[in-house]
Image (cartoon, grey):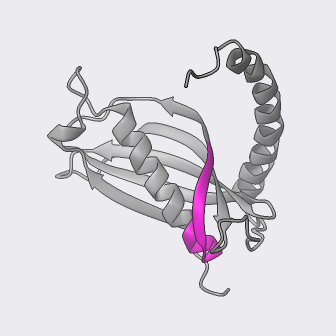
């Protein structure tokens, strides 16, 4: 696939309907934008429909103000057999100015699926630059950390009563 797209930036205007009770953009709105950018990036890389398997390590660094231009940049940083780890960076700022500031960052794992909804192979991404090699190595470390966190979280899930019904 010669037209694979590894990186994409989506832009949104932070609207009054996006604000929380404190008057800033609601974290849920930011998470929706992140998911949209991750999907567009993964679909552009794989050429397939993709689903979100994991979103984690989200850090809300600074608030986004209503009226800001928000830029969500998504970049493939690691590929598995059917999955793509997407690094996300969210920047925002006054649309009348060029300057943007970091507001949020995280990792999203997307899985390519076929028409029956089964995981489907994706093209391998091979890092070339030193920065890409660093991101790739970091993604591999995060896989191990997620496994450990998942094991720890099992205790929390088991602590909840089963649903009634």
Residue located 57% across and 40% down the image? 106
38 versus 156 height, above or below: below
Q: Is residue 148 left or right of residue 25?
A: right
Q: Is residue 98 left or right of residue 153?
A: left
The span shown in magenta is 42-54
Q: Is residue 51 magenta?
A: yes
Q: Is residue 92 left or right of residue 118?
A: left
Q: Is residue 68 visible?
A: yes
Q: Quadrant of the N terminus?
A: bottom right
Residue 112: image location, x then y, percent: 66, 66
Pick whichever, 125 or 50, lies toward us: 50
Residue 58: image location, x then y, percent: 54, 34
Q: Is residue 42 left or right of residue 118?
A: left
Res 49 → quadrant: bottom right
Residue 68: image location, x then y, percent: 23, 44
Count of marks, rendered view: 0
Res 153 → quadrant: top right
125 versus 58 height, above or below: below
Q: Is residue 125 magenta?
A: no
Pick whichever, 159 or 30, lies toward us: 159
Pick whichever, 165 or 32, lies toward us: 165
Q: Is residue 6 visible?
A: no
129 versus 27 height, above or below: below
Residue located 73% across and 17% down the image? 158
Q: Quadrant of the C terminus?
A: top right
Residue located 82% across and 28% down the image? 148
Residue 107: image location, x then y, percent: 61, 44
Residue located 73% across and 70% down the image? 120
Q: In the image as oriented, which residue stretches furthest toward the bottom? A: 2
Q: In the image as oriented, which residue stretches furthest toward the front? A: 165
């Amino acid at each position: 696939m010669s037209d694979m797209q590894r990186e994409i930036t989506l832009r949104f205007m932070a609207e009054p309907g996006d604000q929380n009770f404190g008057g800033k953009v609601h974290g849920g709105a930011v998470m929706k934008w992140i998911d949209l950018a991750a999907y567009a990036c993964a679909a552009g890389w794989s050429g397939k429909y993709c689903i979100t398997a994991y979103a984690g390590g989200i850090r809300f660094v600074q608030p986004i103000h209503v009226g800001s231009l928000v830029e969500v940049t998504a970049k493939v940083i690691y590929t598995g057999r059917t999955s793509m780890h997407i690094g996300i960076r969210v920047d925002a700022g006054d649309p009348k100015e060029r300057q943007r500031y970091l507001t949020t960052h995280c990792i999203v794992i997307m899985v390519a699926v076929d028409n029956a909804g089964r995981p489907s192979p994706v093209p391998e991404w091979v890092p070339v630059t030193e920065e890409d090699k660093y991101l790739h190595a970091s993604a591999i470390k995060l896989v191990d950390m997620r496994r450990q966190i998942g094991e720890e979280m099992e205790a929390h899930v088991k602590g909840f009563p089963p649903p009634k019904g």
